Image (spheres, rainbow, N blue to C red):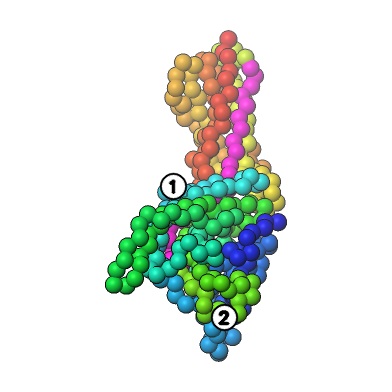
Amino acid sequence: MRTRAAAVAVVCGAAALSGVALPTAQAADTAGVVRPWQLGGHAAATARTSAVAAPQPYALPVTFSNVKVASGKAAVTVGTSAVVHVPYSFTLTATNVDVSADDLYIGLDLYRGSATAPSADLYGDLPATCTVTSSTSSSDGVVTVESCKGTVDIYPKYDLAITDAGAGWHSVAWAVAFNGQNPDNPADVTKIGTAARTGLAAPAVQRLSKLTVNASPEPVKKNKTLTITGSLTRANWDTGKYAGYTGQKVKLQFRKKGSSTYTTLKTVTTDSHGNLKTTYKATADGYWRYSFAGTSTTPAVSAAGDYVDVK
């Protein structure tokens, strides 16, 4: 089970006082956990919050810009066990905020669905690391600009279900200043400041795929038939295992010895177990492989070429 710094990960006490509703669905180990960015009223209202005006954190005078996640990549791929660290960076501009305070926390989450009722939330083991790039005085006070960076750390065993695969993810940059209040049980939630920018772009989260190939017999006589088998599998986050990807079109390709280019020979469809099998006439020495173009939930992958000597 994942463990986090209490002030950043578990702020249920502050949430209870501010009347923030919990997300409707989360990973098993984070059920009942309110993330810092949800303290500012982004979570859906409940009967309690609509009937009674509960104390709320104040709006922290902080803005976020130049937000980048995964270095701008369209997708991140996650297997069954290895932790995936997704880098992020952004610029934070604060007005009259003590950015050196020990209980000022800054970070970025990835969430799926709506900001008011996210179905999943991914976050970092640690808050962002920020460096002051400028500090100027104006009629509004002291304006401090910081360059912030960190990682969203994805633990597939605890954080993801297969229904989370694909697009539909967003990023939210956030900051929360506890200003001396106990994060778990604040005496006065109105002294806590929060800021969040939701609805920002985020990469798709895809199920890591694997593809194998085996061409036989080896060696083979010229113009005789080769049988090429293989298997296309992808991570199943519900079971923690790899399972066959069924009904997918996969290209059989060949690269002649001495060449650097693969040529597509035919298209083969995976069976009900994700297996591949076809035949082709062997005419020259070279490498045989299967290649999968990918889908919205599963990345493209090509098998390592299997060399066959033609006699």
What is the quadrant of residue 30 in the picture? bottom right
Frontmost residue, 12 versus 117: 12
- Indicate the quadrant containing the C terminus: top left, top right, bottom left or bottom right: top right
Q: Position of residue 66 (x, y in %)?
A: 37, 56
Secondary structure beneath dot 1 equals helix
Residue 76 seen anywhere in this rendered image of the structure:
yes
Query: Of the residues shown, which amino acid type is indicated by label 1?
Result: Ser
Task: Say left or right for 83 vs 87.
Answer: right
Question: Alpha-carbon distance for marks 2 and 1?
Answer: 39 Å
Magenta-drawn stretch, dominant element (helix, strand or loop): strand
Residue 13 seen anywhere in this rendered image of the structure:
no
In the rendered image, which residue does mark 2 sit on? 188
Image position of 226 with respect to 205: above or below: above
Image position of 163 with respect to 178: above or below: above
Q: Nearer the viewer, mark 2 or mark 1?
A: 2
Image position of 177 with respect to 236: above or below: below
Question: Which residue: 64% across, 72% down?
Answer: 184
Label 2: few (<14), some or many (≥20) within 10 Å?
some
Query: Of the residues shown, which amino acid type is indicated by label 2?
Result: Asp
Q: Position of residue 132 (x, y in %)?
A: 41, 56
Image position of 227 with respect to 147: above or below: above
Question: Which residue: 49% across, 73% down?
Answer: 193
Frontmost residue, 50 versus 244: 50
Q: If you read the primary sequence from the N terminus, does the residue marked by circle 2 or circle 1 appear first?
A: 1
In the rendered image, which residue does mark 1 sit on? 71
Extent of the magenta region: 196-218
